[in-house]
Image: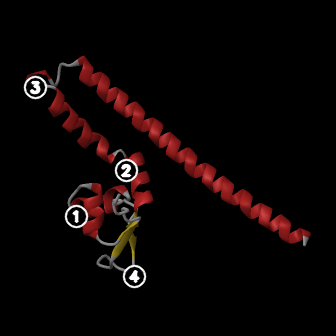
Amino acid sequence: MAQAPEKPQMLNSWKEIASFLDRGVRTVQRWEHELNLPVHRIGKGRRSPVHASVPELKFWVATSGVNRTANGLALERQILPAGLRRNSDALETSHRLMAESLKLVRSVAETSVRQQRAAEALQKRIMEMRARLR
């Protein structure tokens, strides 16, 4: 069996970043300035080349809430006819659940980052203690 090619873990241009996020180049550039999209520049200046890591982008998407509005609108258009969109209890429940879900994702992501930092600090302390014992 042929395996599917592995997705890159590093995106090396605005086009690749925009394609990964399924948005336009100008949109992701705006997100960099307005919403702190985790994009790194090679060199100094606004026109210097950019790169971004896929895990950082996934974390940012999960915690920024940027896709929540777009996905909510798409969901609304798929499920209900135009006349029923505003009056549906199901839609309101769906939006509430989506918001709560986003809060939980953010909480888990933030906790994960805190635990990772704590583990790194602990590892550093262990290495320092080992060095003192030698």
Q: Which residue is mark 1?
A: 25
Query: Dot 2: within a 10 Å radius of its alpha carbon, few (fewer than 14), some, or many (20 or more) residues?
Result: some
Q: Earlier in the sequence, mark 3 or mark 1?
A: 1
Query: Dot 1: within a 10 Å radius of its alpha carbon, few (fewer than 14), some, or many (20 or more) residues?
Result: some
Q: Which residue is mark 3?
A: 81
Tag 2: amino acid: Val
Tag 3: amino acid: Pro
Q: Quadrant of the N terminus?
A: bottom left
Q: Quadrant of residue 7?
A: bottom left
Residue 43 circle label: 4
**Distance from the alpha carbon under mark 3 to that under mark 2:** 29 Å
Q: Which residue is mark 2?
A: 61
Q: Secondary structure at mark 4?
A: loop
Is residue 78 depicted above or below 52 in this figure? Answer: above
* Residue 31 in the image, given as x and y percentages of width and height: 30, 58
Q: Are marks 2 and 1 in contact (CB under 8 Å)?
A: no
